[in-house]
Amino acid sequence: MRRLIVNADDFGLTQGVNRAIVESHYHGIVTSSTLMANGRAFEDAVPQAKSASPLSVGCHVVLVDGVPILDRKQTSTLVDKAAGDGHFYESLTNFALRAVAGRIDGGEIEAEVIAQIRKLQAAGVVVSHLDTHKHTHIFPQVLRPLLRAAGACGVRAVRNPFGPVRFSVLTKRPGLWKRYGQVAILNRLGGRFRRSVADEGLLTTDGTVGVVATGAMDSYLFEQVVESLPEGTWELVCHPGYNDAELGNVRTRLRDSREVELKLLTSPTTREILNRNHVQLISYRDLA
């Protein structure tokens, strides 16, 4: 049996992203989404998340390129002191180097993750799962406190950001070479991830598919992903949205691609591809 969770990230980023995610759920194949506690459109997203009852809503934990929920004293190793604005580091590379070097306090990560989850729960959102902005929990130094925070807040599932990458896709999309190389290297951390999740008693999928195609996903790549989907339960990460004026004020590399994904996710052809390949859609709520 092959099962697929289609999760829309960045719920709460902008009102246009919120609208696209809800449309992709009601009129498309999105089964789950993750909400940013510190997103600028958080207040707009909450009532939509609560009213879309079939949609499984998790927390999109932000530890880079955003603003912490807790104050600076409680996040002193997480914020960019050089910038002086109380924001997280913008660069994932800078964050990763600091984490690997032991310069980020795990207790601060745990406290900030708890604060973000609790903000959603206080707003009436039943948090079904966790993932992280830019997949920061691929690093063990982030994963361990994240899992402790999940347990403290009663969240039972977490995204497995590791998964198969298909070399053959690069023949048609050579622009994905760099991304392919990055994902292939980071996949070496997958075994440690699975052991850590099991040790904490949390649930996860067999992995995530389509990460290499982030920002480039189209009908061809989607069909390639589905046709090569292994047996088991997998997650497809997506980023539908509207490239409007509000998004223009947000730091993100995903702009036009969000509208391309919205059309893909709501296309009848997309569902036909899933049916033809006997792939069952489920949500994180079904997993947990």
Image (spheres, rainbow, N blue to C red):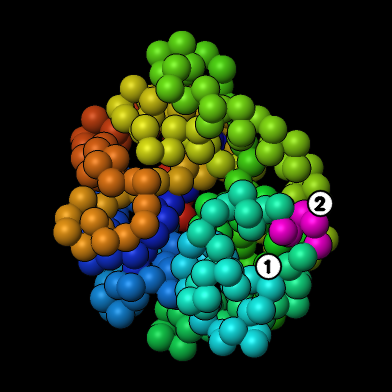
* Residue in the image at 75% along x and 72% along y: 105
x then y, percent, for residue 144: 76, 64
x then y, percent, for residue 249: 26, 61
Amino acid found under the numbered disc labelled 2: Arg
x then y, percent, for residue 32: 42, 57
Residue segment shown in magenta: 98-102
Q: Quadrant of residue 123?
A: bottom left
Question: How many C-alpha atoms fall within 10 Å of the one at disc 1: few (<14), some, or many (≥20)?
Answer: many
* Residue in the image at 80% along x and 57% along y: 101
**Residue assigned mark 1:** 146
- Looking at the rendered structure, the secondary structure element under dot 2 is helix
User: Residue 99 lies in magenta, yes or no?
Assistant: yes
* Residue in the image at 34% along x and 22% along y: 220
Q: Earlier in the sequence, mark 2 or mark 1?
A: 1
Amino acid found under the numbered disc labelled 1: Leu
Quadrant where the C terminus sits is bottom right
Front position in the image: 273 or 127: 127
Is disc 2 in contact with disc 1, using a CB cutoff of under 8 Å? no
- Looking at the rendered structure, the secondary structure element under dot 1 is helix
* Residue in the image at 54% along x and 54% along y: 91
**Residue assigned mark 2:** 195
Going by the image, does 69 lie left or right of 189?
left
User: Residue 79 lies in magenta, yes or no?
Assistant: no
Mark 2–mark 1 Cα distance, whole angstroms, equals 14 Å
Q: Is residue 47 above or below residue 23?
A: below
